[in-house]
Amino acid sequence: MRCRREYIALITVLMWGLAGCSGSGSEPSEAQMKDAMLDAMNHPPGIKVSDPVSITFFKKGACDKPTQQGYNCTFTVMVASANIGASMYNNIPFGVFYQESGSWKMRPPF
């Protein structure tokens, strides 16, 4: 009987662990998407941004079912920056968002 209780306890712990690894299971909120995009614009890998980019308007659209890459979500965005290159983000209608270490990230669109 003791052996069975240990197995039941082990199975319960493993199920909770697997449920925790799968993430929250829900798509990012509008605020999480905005923060992820702002972080991606101001901290691109390997590049130092001299003129910070700010988001003046952000409206979340719909998100597709999740894939291994993350959630493909549409949005409307307006950015402001002294850097003329930042205006290209105004023409991006969607992005892929994923969770990493508990926070939402956006994959580079270019």
Image (spheres, grey):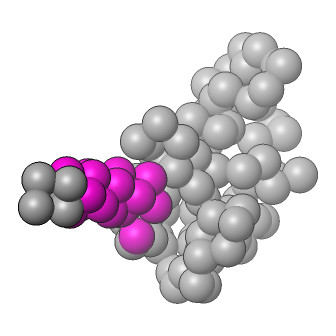
Residue ID at (89%, 52%): 110
Q: What secondary structure is the stretch in magenta mostly built from?
A: helix
The relative height of residue 54 versus residue 90 in the rendered view (above or below) is above
Q: Nearer the viewer, residue 35 or 57?
A: 35
Image side of residue 15 versus residue 96, left or right: left
Measured from the top left, where is residue 43 in percent x and y? 67, 26
Q: Is residue 23 magenta?
A: yes
Measured from the top left, where is residue 90 in percent x and y? 71, 60
Q: Is residue 49 visible?
A: yes
The relative height of residue 101 versus residue 65 in the rendered view (above or below) is above
Residue ID at (63%, 64%): 70
Q: Quadrant of residue 54?
A: top right
The relative height of residue 74 versus residue 104 in the rendered view (above or below) is below
Q: Which residues are magenta?
A: 6-25
Measured from the top left, where is residue 71 in percent x and y? 60, 70
Give the quarter of the figure containing the N terminus. bottom left
Image side of residue 85 versus residue 25, left or right: right
Q: Nearer the viewer, residue 29 or 86?
A: 29
Q: Quadrant of residue 39?
A: top right
Residue ID at (57%, 46%): 105
Measured from the top left, where is residue 23 in percent x and y? 42, 58
Residue ID at (82%, 19%): 47
Q: Is residue 19 magenta?
A: yes
Q: Is residue 31 visible?
A: no
Image side of residue 89 versus residue 40, left or right: right
